[in-house]
């Protein structure tokens, strides 16, 4: 899988000394109020960002996939993480220290510009996620989520195979029930929009965009 994100940054080559850490499903990458010391970059997998209020109520702020950064608040001097970051599936993450990331951004103007463009694009996607959850049907939310996971929004021309992407996980991502997700996944399979491999992987085809155009 390509390590370039939508901004065009080849992150591993820009930061060759960044630590590479693999997290299992439900593995905590960092917890809310942990010291904010690192910037994280997703090579493969899916990360859930969660927030718990002072009254103990929890909420999901979003989901990030390959090519996404998180924890970048440390660049501005934030003392602690505002959310918890949890791997939903096996997830490979590059971790770079705050000081090292700041040095790269100061010494590499092109990387800095691309990183800013990435952050702006991600904010736009978060707005689209909110609109999606407020106004779109479960079927359309599921289709959009699958296309995002397959990185078609990032110009990917490859038909990626997602591993260990259960219906329970997808239900959590789209804000629905497992049974409803299963119904729509069966529909997508019959229409040829997705395919389950013998190894248990999930292949997503670009034709799934037809659901968003209806």
Image (spheres, rainbow, N blue to C red):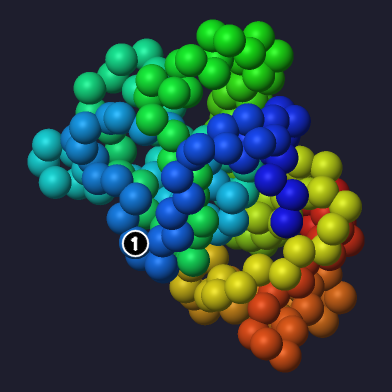
Residue for point 65% across, 55% down: 149
Residue 12 drawn above or below residue 72: below
Image-quadrant location for residue 191: bottom right
The answer to which of 72 and 52 lies nearer the viewer is 72
Residue for point 63% across, 30% down: 14
Residue for point 48% across, 15% down: 103
Image-quadrant location for residue 158: bottom right
Q: In this view, does 163 lie to the left or right of 213?
A: left
Residue 162 drawn above or below residue 68: below
Q: In this view, does 116 lie to the left or right of 192?
A: left
Residue 129 drawn above or below residue 145: above
Q: Residue 97: x, y in percent?
A: 38, 30
Instruction: Residue lying at the far front in this picture: please name it.
Output: 17
Residue for point 76% across, 43% down: 153
Q: Residue 127: x, y in percent?
A: 57, 30
**Residue placed under numbered mark 1 in the picture:** 27
Instruction: Residue lying at the far bottom in this picture: please name it.
Output: 198
The answer to which of 193 and 197 lies nearer the viewer is 197
Q: What element carries label 1?
A: loop
Q: Is residue 188 left or right of residue 35?
A: right
Q: Residue 62: x, y in percent?
A: 46, 43
Instruction: Residue lying at the far left in this picture: please name it.
Output: 55
The answer to which of 43 and 172 lies nearer the viewer is 43
Q: Residue 116: x, y in percent?
A: 61, 17
- Total label count? 1
Count residues near mark 1 (Cα–Cα under 10 Å), then give few for <14, some for 14-19, many for 20+. Answer: some
Q: Is residue 44 visible?
A: yes
Q: In this view, does 105 lie to the left or right of 70?
A: right
């Amino acid at each position: 899988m390509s390590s370039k994100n939508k901004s065009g940054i080849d992150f591993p080559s820009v930061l060759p000394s960044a630590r590479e850490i693999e997290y299992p499903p439900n593995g905590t990458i960092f917890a809310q109020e942990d010291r904010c010391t690192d910037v994280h970059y997703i090579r493969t997998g899916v990360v859930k960002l969660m927030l718990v209020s002072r009254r103990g109520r929890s909420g999901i702020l979003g989901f990030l996939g390959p090519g996404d950064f998180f924890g970048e608040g440390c660049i501005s001097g934030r003392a602690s993480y505002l959310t918890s970051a949890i791997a939903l599936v096996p997830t490979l993450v590059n971790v770079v220290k705050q000081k090292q990331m700041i040095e790269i951004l100061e010494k590499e103007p092109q990387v800095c510009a691309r990183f800013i463009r990435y952050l702006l694009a991600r904010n736009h996607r978060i707005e689209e996620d909110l609109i999606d959850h407020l106004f779109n049907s479960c079927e359309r939310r599921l289709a959009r989520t699958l296309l995002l996971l397959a990185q078609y929004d990032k110009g990917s021309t490859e038909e990626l195979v997602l591993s260990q992407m259960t219906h329970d996980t997808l239900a959590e991502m789209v804000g629905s029930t497992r049974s409803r997700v299963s119904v729509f996944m069966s529909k997508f399979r019959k229409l040829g929009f997705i395919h389950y491999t013998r190894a248990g992987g999930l292949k997503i085809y670009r034709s799934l965009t037809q659901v968003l155009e209806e």
